[in-house]
Image (spheres, rainbow, N blue to C red):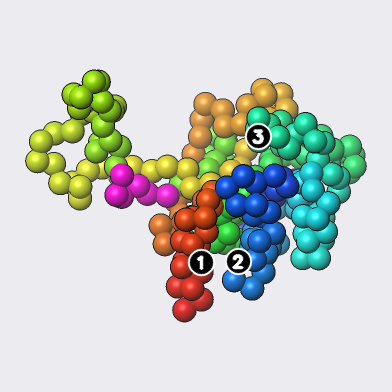
Amino acid sequence: MNNNGKKILGVITARGGSKGIPRKNIKILGDKPLIAHTIDAAKKSALISHLIVSTDDEEIAGVCREYGVDVPFIRPRELATDEAGHLEVMKHAILEMENIHGFRFDYAVILQPTSPFRTAEDIDGTVNKLFLYPEADSAVSLVEVINNHPVKIKKLNGDRVFSYSVPEVEGTRRQDLSGAYKRSGAVYAMRRDLLIEKNRLYGDHVVGYVVPRERYIDIDDEFDWLKAEYILKNINK
């Protein structure tokens, strides 16, 4: 698998503030900081041509440099608040890197440290979807929803129960339901012009790459961290 000369910017996004788990991005998971798991996978990607970390935190930047990834700038403080979204962060990263290198990127990839068990194959598989579907605006990693299928989700009007969106036919077994998926949080890939010219993160045409459920985690709180430790032990086995 190769990128056919395309310039693809991989951005590991890691701000210093973390309410659920203080200093989460550099907390030790297994034998290394959480963010190092993402760095290791991203460095093995065959498609990412330029890999950086976007952070507002000097300590995180130092840890990332120790693990061999470039931190070409410190993210402005206004792009590291709870209100700042990935769209603004990615636009800043792309424009900064284009200014540094003097050329335009073709694609951008978001890699969040909170999904430490993605592999290089997950990254390249997601990016490759954009090569396979030239009409697509973006590609995202997905994980199959098993235990909380959307057909089973309900809402209350007073005390009365209604289907939240899709009506549930009485007697339908879970295994008879069609596949349902949600974004796994591991990989987001998009065209450069979608971000810069159209000011959008996903666009109208999104394609998906399915990752295994046994490696899925999106760490937000202490309970998620415990699950990540359990998954890591099983991966190591």
Chain-order first, disc 3 or disc 2: 2
Q: Which residue is mark 3?
A: 82
Residue at the image point whose x is 65% and y is 34% from the top = 82
Residue 4: tell me if it is visible: no
Does 165 lie within the magenta span? no
**Label 2, residues with CA under 10 Å away: few <14, some 14-19, many ≥20:** some
With respect to residue 186, does 37 lie above or below?
A: below
Q: Which residue is mark 1?
A: 229
Q: CA distance from mark 3 to mark 2?
A: 24 Å
- Specify whether 115 is left or right of 76: left
Q: Which residue is mark 2?
A: 29
Residues at circles 1 and 2 in contact by the CB criterion of under 8 Å: yes
Residue 66 numbered mark, or none: none
Q: Quadrant of residue 39?
A: bottom right
Chain-order first, disc 1 or disc 2: 2
Quadrant in which the N terminus appears: bottom right
Residue 29: tell me if it is visible: yes
What is the three-letter code of the residue carrying label 3?
A: Asp
**Residue stretch rendered in magenta on the structure:** 143-148
Chain-order first, disc 1 or disc 3: 3
- Specify whether 54 is left or right of 230: right
Give the mark count.
Answer: 3
Specify the principal SS of the magenta part. Answer: loop
Residue at the image point whose x is 38% and y is 43% from the top = 181
Tag 1's secondary structure? Answer: helix
What is the three-letter code of the residue carrying label 1?
A: Glu
Q: CA distance from mark 1 to mark 2?
A: 7 Å
Task: Give the image location of residue 91, x and y in percent.
Answer: 74, 33
With respect to residue 193, does 115 lie above or below?
A: below
Residue at the image point whose x is 49% and y is 55% from the top = 224
Nearest to the observer: residue 114 or residue 45? 114
Task: Give the image location of residue 109, x and y in percent.
Answer: 66, 45
